[in-house]
Image: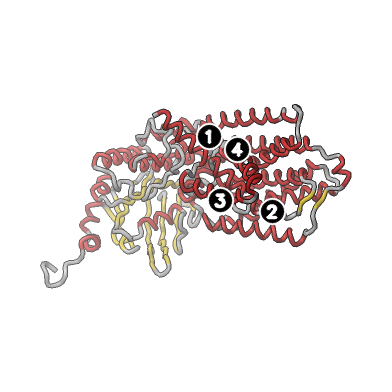
Amino acid sequence: MSGRGGRSETRWAAAILAGFAVLALVPLAAPRDDVLNFLLVILLSITLAESWNIVAGYAGQVNLGHAAFFGIGALVARTLWIDGTPIAAATAAGALLATLSALVIGVAAFRLRGAYFAIGTLALGEISRTTVGNVLAEISTLPTATISTYRLTHRYYVALGLAAVSVAVVAALARSRLGLGMEAVREDEEAAEASGVGALRLKLTALALSAALAGLAGGLFAYYHISYYPSHPFSPHWTFDAVLMTFIGGVGTLHGPVLGAVLYVVLKEYLAVRWVDFHLLIFGALFVAIVLVLPGGLVQAAARLRGAWRR
Amino acid sequence: MPLLEVERVSKAFGGVRAVSDVSVSLEEGELLGIMGPNGSGKTTLFNCIAGALSPDEGRIRLDGHDITGLSPHRICALGIARTFQLVRPFGGLAALDNVLVGRLFGRRRHDGGAHVEAERLLALVGLEGRAAVPAAQLTLIDRKRLDLARALATGPRLLLLDEFLAGLNPAETETAMALIRRLLAGGTTILMIEHIVWALADLSRRLVVLSAGEKIAEGPPAAVAADPAVVDVYLGTPRAGRGRA
């Protein structure tokens, strides 16, 4: 990274978006549902990972309650949609509510720093999951009329669009004054304040932006799944998936979460087929190893390899 | 009107009065040195002025406006910038980005030309050619320079330097002092904490000495050095019955 040029970010954004353009052709070329479903999960994961990356990777605030925003987006979108609101408007409403709740939660949670912030947000996430699970214990299933007109291709394109939007948002952020301020807060909050950065405002902005994208992803979840328990999208595994993907790829970079999401979903699929839940153990160990040995993830590993090659 | 007025400021941590009833004032364009033994409250006083701490008692005014207890980023925007005793650059960011943070956030109005200005400041402190280097990879002296460049990028009227010369070798000290003189000549007002007495005596026309949180002396360097209270703090009082009383 040489100054705010952000040239490498722009190149990566272009490469990723070009990859998405190719993915847009997949449904046209003899689509198989299992292929589309698999790609959709990857795209949804990219959106979730990039959204978590904004608050944790750029602003340096390890939010472990991320699933709450995904869940709120899903809950609002699903409820309004089933009541007859067009899915786009319902999703927008869900994202808006996720953003607003991020601001409210942020004002309280940002009184905590570091590990305490992480623990506090984890608790808030669990409170939201338990509450939704108790109030809405019934499974949510789409009406028969909706199921009969269900088209996987539509969901696929929504997922593709959202992933593209989240990559574009992070790319723009990485080049902006706002993104620079967030990185300053991540590096040293006190020194950032002394340099004129209003840390609380930037942290709230990061959390709100992150929640908006997670809320949109929740809307996609509500649109995609035919039936699920309303508390399911509030489950902490959505948070920890995003954490793992972002760290595996490279936290605080544009392309890291994308690489991490692809690798994570592919590996998880492969491992789950062979060993069912054993993948949890493997990813847990992998996470510890990465944090200890390679805190910059795949992106850092690639940079090291390049360095060694040149030498 | 003085540029900075610190009026009877006190700050306690639990039962320890780190700063006790200290008043200091600074005219525009002046360099005032603050000295005192370790733990005498110098950095606490700095933190009160810069907003990192809120004083328990007393007022702090910049240009007549009360800034007591404002948050650090607002005080920075009003024109007070600081460096840290233990340097605190943004380690993961390139040197140029460090300076850009100050430039883009530390002023109430920001205009174009931030990149050019940031490059100019890097050159001013002697970091030309290191713009792309992550701050964490710079040497100590270079990180100090970077801290200063970042502070200057906020366009300060008053610069707080906390032991800026500590840890520098004689040649580096000379360079740093020349830089401070250039800043003074350029109209920046400077308040500096320093242990290197000869450097302070050389740079400032007025010194303040703190001890155990209280101001025990103030005046021209020669007068302060001869002040019995200052001699007592630094060298101790001869015990009765031994030598001259």
Q: Chain of mark 3?
A: A
The residue to which callout 3 is attached is A284
Please rate how many residues cluster around mark 2, counting C-alpha atoms within 10 Å: few if below 14, some from 14 to 19, many from 20: many
The answer for how far apart the CA atoms under marks 1 and 4 are is 35 Å
* In this rendering, the label closer to the viewer, 2 or 1: 2
Q: Position of residue A53 (x, y in %)?
A: 58, 44
Q: Which residue is mark 4?
A: A258
The kind of residue tagged 2 is Phe
* Callout 3 secondary element: helix
**Amino acid type, mark 1:** Asp
Instruction: Give the mark, 3 or 4, whose residue is nearer the N terminus.
Output: 4
Q: Are the residues under marks 2 and 4 on the same chain? A: yes
Q: Quadrant of the C terminus of chain B?
A: bottom left
Q: Are marks 3 and 4 on the same chain?
A: yes
The front one of A31 and B92 is A31
Which secondary structure lies at badge 1? loop
How far across and how far down the image is residue B90, in percent? 45, 43
Q: CA distance from mark 2 to mark 3?
A: 20 Å
Q: Which of the 4 image quarters holds residue B118?
A: top left
Q: Amino acid at mark 4?
A: Val
Circle number at residue B111? 1
Residue located farthest toward the left when viewing the structure as drawn: B243
Q: Which residue is mark 2?
A: A234
Q: CA distance from mark 3 to mark 4?
A: 19 Å
The crowding category of the residue bearing disc 1, from other C-alpha atoms within 10 Å (few below 14, some 14 to 19, many at least 20), is few
Circles 3 and 4 in contact, beta carbons < 8 Å: no
Give the label, 2 or 3, closer to the camera: 3
